[in-house]
Amino acid sequence: MEVIAESWHSLPCVCVNSCEEEKLVSNKNQLQEHTSSYYAATINEYPAFPQLRGAKSADICVVGAGFTGIATALTLAERGYSVAVVEANRVGWGASGRNGGQLISGVGGAARLRKKHGEGVSDLLWDLKWRGNDIIFDRVKKYSIDCNLKPGYIDVALKPRHVSDLEDDMKELQRRNFPYQYHLLDRDETQETLGTEAYIGGLTNMRNGHLHPLNLCLGEAHAAVGLGAAIYEQSPVTEIVHGARPKVMTDQGYVEADSVVLAGNAYHKLEAKHLSGLTFPAGSYIIGTEPLPSEVIDEINPQDMAVCDLNEVVDYHRLSADGRLLYGGRCNYSGREPASIKSSILPRMLKVYPQLKDVRIDYEWGGKVGIVIKRVPVLGRINSNVWYSQGYSGHGVNNTHIMGEIMADAIAGQMEKFDLFAGIKHYRIPGSQWIGNQVIALGMLYYRLRDLL
Ligand SMILES: Cc1cc2nc3c(=O)[nH]c(=O)nc-3n(C[C@H](O)[C@H](O)[C@H](O)COP(=O)(O)OP(=O)(O)OC[C@H]3O[C@@H](n4cnc5c(N)ncnc54)[C@H](O)[C@@H]3O)c2cc1C
């Protein structure tokens, strides 16, 4: 299972040049609404949150309202802290509101963590691996969040060594008496389950699943507000003024707090002295078809599973609640932003489902993933009261929720899990972002070669 956890969405695609979002942040003229995606088109209505104006005070101020920021804020609010969240654009504007919606267990860099801390942490890592799923399933129920959460996921094998990986994962589930349904599928069963000859095996897991990520993020944000948290949108943070009570500055105001949590992931450039070069922004891209007829759905995914292959650089797909195929993956290995997302991703989708050749594509979009060379999420703190968590290497829906809880624990003084991650020394690529992305582009080629073997 670990192989999956570590490889899922790893290094999906790279943009070296001018991703539109790179122009973001710190200038109010560049404030952005949600990118035009299937998710933005089906967003639950919500009144915009105000801009930050004037002086505010809170126990904790969180910068960035993606899953990391919102999950941390909600956990803290549940524990009675006063929390303010400051977001440059909109809640869920970044990767959290744009992703594949695949809820997959795992802890980034688990093998590396075991190597560093010893096999003694294996049980802890196993529990953490499922913790993000538990938090999400619990919150969706507790706060009645309307985000189309559905159990059902399948890892699919493209080559014999993937089948061996799945067999190992299966043994681990058995050894741990995993309490949810899972099945190892042979070639015929996989082909029957997914209506394609592209895969030669699969492992289903009913504790994983899929969801509408933007609506989950918004639902959690509203849950936090219901517990007293304040959220400010369209308020890019320009600077952190350090001190006993650091100040989170925007052009029009600030929040003073006992602790600050930086949760801007691939989109923020704050605290460059400490954080630049530790994570790299790589692009990942998705297309969405028109709603498919029920007979086509019955053929390609009658059990409504989220699907992800086992390549190093993965392709992934699932059906939306209204029956569209949302298909995502890599575009190229050149390290450049694709000229057309649709013409890059569509051939990959048709390789798996040639029967969809006449289907209309209604949506195409992308977003930035924070890649970490060692795959372990980058957790740490600056001056004892400015905390950060970022870099889930494309495996963020569950990991952000795990880390949100770990950050909240750490702020309350429970450091064990935080130290597990913060103890990893990460590689820092010196120089400009351009140079960093060239390195990632080379890394992409390496993984592509491995996938070809
Ligand atoms: C196309 C795509 C598909 C993906 N598919 C999956 C998937 O299916 N399953 C999965 O597990 N993971 C997936 N991922 C990865 C996952 O979405 C991310 O790991 C996760 O959402 C990261 O959440 P985050 O809150 O850390 O960052 P983000 O969601 O990117 O949020 C960061 C926020 O910080 C804000 N911000 C930045 N700078 C500032 C500032 N100076 N002031 C104030 N706010 C600031 C940004 O505006 C943004 O809203 C995918 C990612 C992409 C892009």
Image: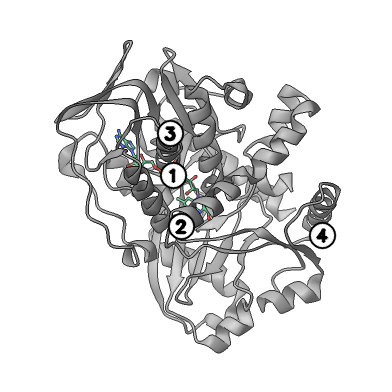
The residue that disc 4 covers is 160
Q: Dots 4 and 2: beta carbons under 8 Å?
A: no
Tag 3: residue type? Leu
> Does the numbered disc 1 mark a residue whose Cβ is under 8 Å from ligand 1?
yes
In the picture, measured across the screen, residue 392 lies left or right of residue 161, that is left
Residue type beneath disc 4 = Pro
**Three-letter code, disc 1:** Phe
Earlier in the chain: of badge 2 and badge 1, it is 1
Q: Secondary structure at mark 4?
A: helix
Residue pictured at 32% horizontal, 66% vertical: 41
Q: Which mark is residue 76?
A: 3
Q: How far apart are labels 4 and 1 at the CA level?
A: 35 Å
- Contact (CB < 8 A) between labels 3 and 1? no
Residue at 14% over, 31% down:
252
Label 1 residue SS: helix
Q: Residue at the spot x=47%, y=23% of the render?
A: 411
Q: In the rendered image, which residue does mark 2 sit on?
A: 285
Tell me if label 4 and label 3 are in contact, CB under 8 Å.
no
Disc 4 + disc 1, Cβ < 8 Å: no
Q: Quadrant of ligand 1?
A: top left
Separation (CA) of disc 4 from disc 3:
45 Å
Q: Earlier in the sequence, mark 4 or mark 3?
A: 3
Amino acid type at circle 2 is: Tyr
Q: Position of residue 245 (x, y in %)?
A: 31, 15
Which mark is nearer the camera, 4 or 1?
1
Residue placed under numbered mark 1 in the picture: 67
- Find out if the beta carbon at label 2 lies less than 8 Å from the nearest ligand 1 atom: yes
Sequence order check, earlier mark of 4 and 1: 1
